[in-house]
Amino acid sequence: MTVQNLLVELFVEELPPKALKKLGEVFAQTLANSLKNAGLTASTAAVTAFASPRRLAAHVTDVAAVAADKPVVQKLMPVAVGLDATGNATPALLKKLAALGADASAVAGLRRENDGKADILFYDSMAKGATLAEGLQKALEAALSALPIPKVMTYQLQDGWSSVNFVRPAHGLVALHGTDVVGLNILGLTSGRQTHGHRFEAAVDPVVFNNADEYAAKLAADGAVIASFEARRAEIARQLQAAAAKAGPHLKPIDDDALLDEVTALVERPNVLIGQFEEEFLAVPQECLILTMKANQKYFPLLDAAGKLTNKFLVVSNISPEDASAVIGGNERVVRPRLADAKFFFDQDRKKSLESRVAGLGKVVYHNKLGTQGERVQRVAAIARAIADQLGGGALTQQAEQAAVLAKADLLTDMVGEFPELQGIMGRYYALHDGLAGEVADAVEDHYKPRFAGDSLPRGQVGTIVALADKLETLVGMFGIGQIPTGDRDPFALRRHALGIIRMLSEGDLNLPLNALLTATSQAFAAVDGFKAADSALADFIYDRLAGSLRDQGYTAQEVDAVVSQRPQRLGDIPKRLAAVRSFSALPEAAALAAANKRVGNILKKVDGTVDAKIDVNLLKEAPEIALNAALASVRPQADAAFGKGDYTASLQALAALRAPVDNFFNDVMVNAEDAALRANRLGLLATLHLAMNQVADISKLST
């Protein structure tokens, strides 16, 4: 079978830049997968995706002109139904064969096979392989249908009557198999071998391809377009570094992968230029200037070696004139009003203190069932006060309450109104301007942290307290009004809030029992109509997030289940408990003790009522139960002492001495004795054993 390489390109108007990378990947991969499913390519065929602002393309190696014929096995019917007593075909069989394109002559070749119940007739045939034109037409339709486009547009074709739906109007289609054009029709387009290059800088228009393999090179040479998204991105990154070095010693462009991807999707042949603005704008917090340059202009601000913003920036242009001064000057003129707006907002905001804005939060709706932002702030302040009292009180409580009250005040500033991404950040600047303590100002910014996976935690204790209070208020409040995440829906980011609480409690090793935190937080909602505390459901939710997070960190499901199933109240203990479980698992006695613990748990579950962990030594009759009680009397104080010191590894390892007494007990002692007192005493012995073995973790979870 002769194979050649294939190229398909769809030429369109400018595609959505933030989606371009994904569009290119899905287009190429879906096209290639469809061809493989049709038998037109081998599973080892290489796929190369191309995506520029005005094109989606794919290059696929080793594509056949015609797929190989495929054997087809068709199950027909039981022999008793398809053949009469003389062995001739019944009307039912002839009708079935006719539907498959066969006639009575095929009856003699039918295969019989027993399916375990009866003999079945099978019709074996060969399906003719699809031609490339047929397979590629279906593959292209599948690729366009699979594109992750939330909203398509309807546009009219050149005939003036027909219309089609796509993300942007399409104007050209290239389909080359080696040197041959593959005849396709889609979106009102007929395939050919030509496309268009750069709007202004193409050396040739149209760009004509002689074969599938010259696509990228010829489009770059004749069309002034770097077709590969990754190649274009790498070229922009290279030019950014070179331009930064040219702009000044030790300067570097801001590191922002999302911005780099977006700019890559906006240009076809990048040309990085250096611009600058007046130094007076540097008096504005650099976060404001950086955000306005990135979000509004797609510029790369330049930072010095200390990470401080300079008055220079980089522009990724789509044209390369001999004299770039007009392009640079135009970009400098465009950015100047943006920076002036930021300076104006900053100057105006500082005319009012944060404290003076707090009252205004009472007019801002937070949630129709939970009241205003003002009411929310009062709840957060009460929760922060309660947490701070547990962690030290005094000045800590005073600062935590002050920071909690001011934390949302910057929502009413002009700067945050223009750039919501700066909430908290601007609050810190304004708090410092108001002369507040650094710990309070830091807490105003940091109470949103951690904002995402891998984000830093609040810098200080005050910030941690307010961040905990803020996230607890959100979680308890939403659960209390029934706004619980379901499936993929989590409009209030409650999963993220839960993970933030877990990180702060765990990594900060804070002595704050989780259930007590939830109870104290629920009390802050006493005045909210319709609120119903859901502390138990919320605790389940948090422990579920905790278990998932621990598994992501590399702990086994058994280790995580052993620790988390015990619901440790102090989350800072969990890493030490996990380390203890892992160390215990390596002991030769671990498997037997885990199995025994599981057996004990199952016995106790079957008992009606509660089994008290009490032992009457006078009722210990058998030598193995006497020995087990003696072993417990020896081991338990050691395990308890180690547990009390937080040495969970030593606490678990002390249990190793129980293996032989436990084995002997189960081998020689009947727990469910006929004598009720004897039975109750043995159950009490097992309950005592169960408590001793499960202080650190439920080691029965380690039993396979």
Image (cartoon, rainbow, N blue to C red):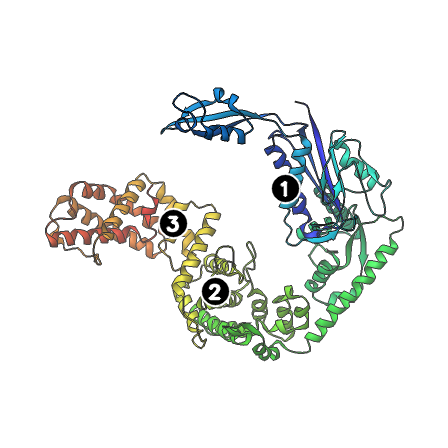
Q: Nearer the viewer, residue 138 or 523?
A: 138
Q: Residues within 10 Å of mark 1 (few under 14, many from 20)?
A: some
Question: What amino acid is at disc 3?
Answer: Asp
Q: Is residue 513 visible?
A: no
Say above or below: 364 vs 643: below
Q: Quadrant of residue 144?
A: top right
Q: Which of the marked residues, 2 or 1, is nearer the chain's N terminus?
A: 1
Question: What amino acid is at disc 2?
Answer: Gln
Q: Which of the marked residues, 1 or 3, is nearer the chain's N terminus?
A: 1
Tell me if label 2 and label 1 are in contact, CB under 8 Å: no
Question: In this rendering, which labeled residue sits more in front, label 2 or label 3?
Answer: 2
Say above or below: 593 vs 354: above
Question: In this rendering, which labeled residue sits more in front, label 1 or label 3?
Answer: 1
Residue beneath label 2, please?
Answer: 483
Q: Which of the marked residues, 2 or 3, is nearer the chain's N terminus?
A: 2
Question: What amino acid is at disc 1?
Answer: Ala
Please provide percent x and percent y for residue 455: 57, 56
Q: Nearer the viewer, residue 38 or 621?
A: 38
Residue beneath label 1, please?
Answer: 142
Alpha-carbon distance for marks 2 and 3? 27 Å
